[in-house]
Amino acid sequence: MVCFSFLKIMMFVFNGVIFLGGLALLGIGIWVKVDSGSFVKLLGAAAPQLMQLVNVGYLCMAVGAFLLLMGFMGCCGAMKESKCLLLVFFAVTLILFIAEVAGAVVVLAFCSVANIFVEYLKNWATKTLREDYGRQEDITAVWDTTMKELKCCGFNNYGDFNSSYFYQIHEKYPSFCCLDNNKCQESAIDHSKQGCLREFEVFLSNKGKIVAGMALGIAALELAAMTVSLILYCQIGTHS
């Protein structure tokens, strides 16, 4: 009886985490849709091909609503000791777990897709630095924020600004590239600053362990939730 009660409590804990995660995703999705005007404006100016990414708000709302339903179903199944709800919860969680494993295998097997994305990103980045930086406010703001936060200069290096619109108009490089922010000529370039691509790779490398840890944590949560729901399913009707 004590063990059964403990399992019910654990089921509430696991599904509480799932419920809160769904609530957070739902909130993000609603925020994206409410403020979609700024996303459309930014993506339209930066990369029209990526305009469909605005629909990520619908995806977040759909996933969030699904997780809310899953969390609610798991809690109700444990509270009402419903074998049907627990079995459905176990089956859906198992399908999600298998899909995640399959997705990870596909990503590892087709990692060359990342190279295609990087090549596309490189073409877009160098083009916007050459033609749009200093001309379009949205593009300029994105690059200024990127170079400031990552402490980088250009996409590859400061050479990306050679013959650019910004250099032709101001006859200098952006202040982020130089030791002397007021006179940012080639002689004042801070060569210790690398291109943003390199800094972004370093950032991803440093955060890779965190991402991997989160993925393992989610997998462990799913396995634990499946185990508890299955044990509860088997014990319902047998405990006294």
Image: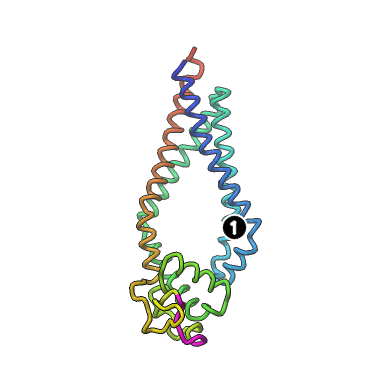
Specify start and end residues of the magenta stretch as a single range. 168-175
Looking at the picture, tell me which residue is in the foreground, 127 or 117: 127
Q: Quadrant of residue 138?
A: bottom right
For residue 167: magenta? no
**Color theme of the render:** rainbow
For the residue pair 195 and 59, the one nearer the viewer reads as 195
Q: Where is residue 145 shown, x and y percent of the image?
A: 50, 67
Tell me which residue sits at (53%, 74%) in the image. 140
Asked if residue 64 is positioned above or below residue 47 in the image, the reply reads above
Q: Secondary structure at mark 1?
A: helix
Q: Is residue 169 magenta?
A: yes
**Looking at the image, how many numbered discs can be counted on the residues?**
1
Residue 158's quadrant in the figure?
A: bottom left
Pick the residue in front: 68 or 129: 129
The residue under label 1 is which amino acid type?
Answer: Asn
| Residue 42 image point, x, y percent | 58, 68
Q: Which residue is at a point 58% across and 23% down the rendered structure image?
A: 80
